Amino acid sequence: MSNMTANRQQALNAAIDRDCPICHCEMVLPTAVPACQHKFCFMCLKGVNMNHLGGCPICRGPIDDNIFRRPTQQLDIKMPVPDSPTPSTSSSTDREVKQEVDEDVKPDVDALNASMNNPPPILMYWLYHGRRQGWWRFDPRIEKDIEEAYIARMPVTEVVICGQPYVIDFSNMTQYPKNNRTHSRDVKRVDAHEFDASNVKGLAGVFKLTR
Ligand SMILES: [Zn+2]
Ligand SMILES: [Zn+2]
């Protein structure tokens, strides 16, 4: 193994608990490939699998299709939007360097960390209707993009779900694959109260574990 490969592997290992090696963000619905235990966001891994990109993105090992059949996780159905693209591997070093430079200023690192660990609560949620019945919540990062487009009064917006482009049509409150308008499903924008009344089944295709 060359040095570079070893370093790369080390970096991957360091970030593996938090960041997804595909989207480089904090993992949403962390999902391990059964054969090798490499972890990714559920949606990122599903995208790789759906688009036949050749096995596990880290080791090229096989991905067992069964993990996508009826995925279930213990999850916070109202989870906040996870960290946006600030790779944890570099941000800690950046902060140390900055602290040295700004020694006289004494930044309130505790307050900064607290605000980063406590993202603001979500006021409005976006749900889509499932293939059979019931409502599902969008991946919180996609939900955030949809909400921003909605607030900006755009008539439609485009999001990428599992590597596939989808159109959200705000005038009809529907979503459909960009290349297949006939497969449209209802979407709705709800507050926390309506969310609770909607009996949401899960998040981005992953069933909420009920006991
Ligand atoms: Zn990801
Ligand atoms: Zn792997």
Image: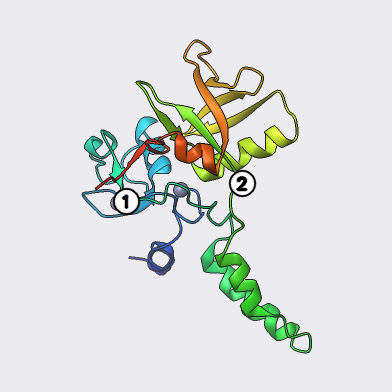
Residue, far right: 104
Label 2 environment density (alpha carbons within 10 Å; few <14, some 14–19, many ≥20) = few
Q: Which residue is mark 1?
A: 74
Q: Residue at the location (29% across, 45% down)?
A: 209
Q: Earlier in the sequence, mark 1 or mark 2?
A: 1
**Residue mark closest to the camera, 1 vs 2:** 2
| Left or right: 87 in relation to 9 | right
Q: Which residue is mark 2?
A: 123
Quarter holding residue 93: bottom right
Q: Quadrant of the N terminus?
A: bottom left
Determine whether, in the image, residue 196 is placed left or right of residue 168.
left
Classify residue 18 by image quadrant: bottom left
Residue drawn at 75 percent across, 30 percent down: 153
Residue shown at 49% from the left, 10% from the top: 182
Amino acid identity at mark 1 = Gln
Q: SS at mark 1?
A: loop
